[in-house]
Image: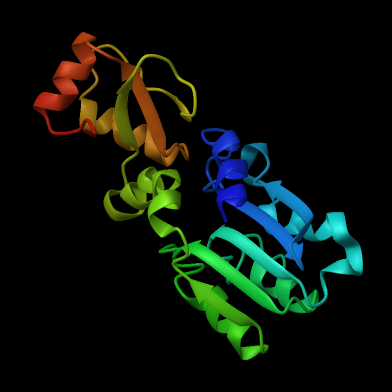
Amino acid sequence: MRRAIAAAGVRLGRTWPNPVVGCVIARDGEVLAEAATADGGRPHAEEQALAQVGGGARGATVYVTLEPCGQRSSGAPSCSEHLCLASVSRVVIAAENPDSLSAGRGVARLRAAGVSVQVGVLADEAEPLYRAFRHKLRTGLPLVEAAADGSGFDARFEPEDDEILADALRRYGQGGYTRLWVPMGAPIAHRLRDLDLLAV
């Protein structure tokens, strides 16, 4: 699971509007495939890892940082469907997925297909990957943090002149952004903090 978390961490800030996910497929202690969500959110990590092993995933264990999707907004087969079709024997998941297209649906599909599922493995270590994702689902607004540079963020938060900050955040959120940054110590960071809009 730590290997999957590390793979996801490299892609953090590059996969919006989808959350970043890391996936490792293994059997008998040997890693067969490793992938993370592609730039722009597609293809998903599970799809890429399964493509690497072809039919070799049968009976393997899959380690994934976030619950596999139960449904795709595009109508394409979901990651949980792909895993079932690949006949994997076990799926180990770090973090639950609160998105309405998942939220237990992926786990339910896997279990119904006879796949052993374990949820919550190294959840605390994976959670930093999903802090902004959960914040956006809960509030509708991107999470904004003060940072030295934009590494690992979706974009820099730069509202238009005289734009109300909450309105600007909503605009960024509607554009698909999840995690934004502002320079540490900058006036906008202080303004956001005063409005309780800056993550601490």
The quarter in which the N terminus is drawn is bottom right
Position in image of residue 179 (x %, y %):
40, 35
Residue ID at (75%, 76%): 88
Give the image location of residue 130, x and y in percent: 42, 48
- Quadrant containing the C terminus is top left
Give the farthest residue toward the left. Answer: 194
Q: Quadrant of residue 85?
A: bottom right
* Colour basis: rainbow
> Height in image: 137 above or below 163?
below
Give the answer, above or below, for where 39 lies relative to 156: below
Image location of residue 161, percent across then percent down:
27, 11
Residue 46 visible at all? yes
Q: Nearer the viewer, residue 30 or 142?
A: 30
Q: Is residue 64 left or right of residue 194?
A: right
Q: Seen in the image, is 83 located left or right of residue 54?
A: left
User: At 74% from the left edge and 58% from the top edge, which residue is drawn?
Assistant: 47
Choose top left, top right, bottom left or bottom right for residue 78: bottom right
Along the line of sight, which residue is nearer the eye, 120 or 74? 120
Please say if 195 is above or below 25. Answer: above
Q: Look at 54% across and 83% down and name the residue there.
A: 108
- Tell which of 199 and 52 is nearer to you: 52
